[in-house]
Image: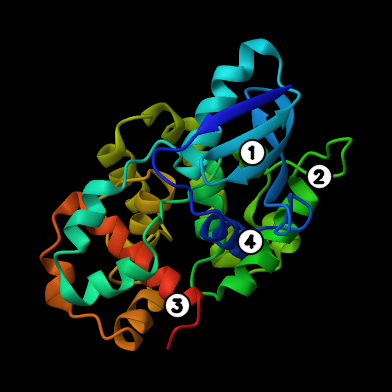
Amino acid sequence: MTLHLASTGTLDVEHTLRVLKLHSLPSQERIDESTAQVHRVLRLDDHLVEVRLTLQTIGVSIEHDAPNDLVPKLRTTIDRWLGLSQDTSCAYASVHEQPTLARLARASNNLRLISYPTIFEALATTIIGQQVSLAAARTLAGRYVEKLGELHPCGLRTFPTAQVTASLDPLQLQAIIRCPLARATTLHTVASWYQNFGRQLAGQDQQFLAQLLALRGVGPWTKDYMALRGLRMPDVFLTSDLVIRRAIINADVRQQDIDRLPTPARYLATLLLWDYDARGQV
């Protein structure tokens, strides 16, 4: 079956593919930039759904095998993942009022926040990626998915569930991911918390983040990154992010321009600086 989801405003296909590719794991996802297609298997409730997304400037066309009763959830999942219904016009208007940010906005005028298909995928990948480069994080997460993700007949694996992750002990997770024991322990702690408490806090973002930050091994960067890319909170500017700090210097962005942004537009400053760095404009 085919499903069409329209985007609010223009979908920047190149940017979307670039962000997806930065975080893509070989056993989980196939991306064909030449055709702007993304092939994944999503877990909707207890059902595995194979999807092939074709990105267009007006939205996304989705070939899928979801049963009819799961189509609304599939629609919501992909819309939220890619930010298709996000209206960025007000945020861009605010950014254009700040001179050093306006330069970046003119070069990338259709960015939107790309998230993850599920909250737990955002959580787990954020924990695994703590204090390592993006390339290293992909390697570690790739091992995690290869070992614990459920294999679909198409050859791709789903992202591991919180339940499966919490069922192992930290030493087992360390052996699978080949990461420091402290990080495997944090992943186990977060998975157990999410399984027992976190998933019940849907829509209660501040309570979710407060409980998350209270967990051993979770610091301010993890909380803020999760708030932005996991919960899609628009008021987050990732001050502590090393890439953001580098981009501020290289792009000659004034801190006062960032500080003057209204809170609903702060996410866009983060996206613009990430995009500037990813495009190598130094």
Image depth: mark 2 or mark 1 in front: 2
Q: Which mark is first along the chain, 1 or 4?
A: 4
Residue 90: x and y in percent read: 21, 48
Q: Quadrant of the C terminus?
A: bottom left
- For mark 2, give the secondary structure: loop
Residue positioned 51% across, 49% down in the render: 122
174 in relation to 107, above or below: above
Give the x, y percent position of residue 279.
50, 76
Q: At 63% from the left edge and 55% from the top edge, which residue is drawn?
A: 170
Q: Indicate which label's residue lies in the foreground, 4 or 1.
A: 4
Badge 3 local density, few (<14 within 10 Å), some, or many (20+)? Answer: some
Under circle 1, the secondary element is loop
Residue drawn at 37 percent across, 47 percent down? 212
Q: State which mark lies toward you, 3 or 1.
A: 3
**Residue 182 horizontal/vertical position (percent):** 54, 66
Query: Which is closer to the viewer, label 4 or label 2?
Result: 4
Say which mark, if any, is on residue 156.
Answer: 2
Q: CA distance from mark 3 to mark 4?
A: 15 Å
Please tell me whether mark 3 sits on a helix, a strand or a loop.
Answer: helix
To which residue does mark 1 refer? 161
| Way the structure is coloured | rainbow
Disc number placed over residue 21 in the picture, else none: 4
Along the line of sight, the residue nearer the viewer: 175 or 102: 102
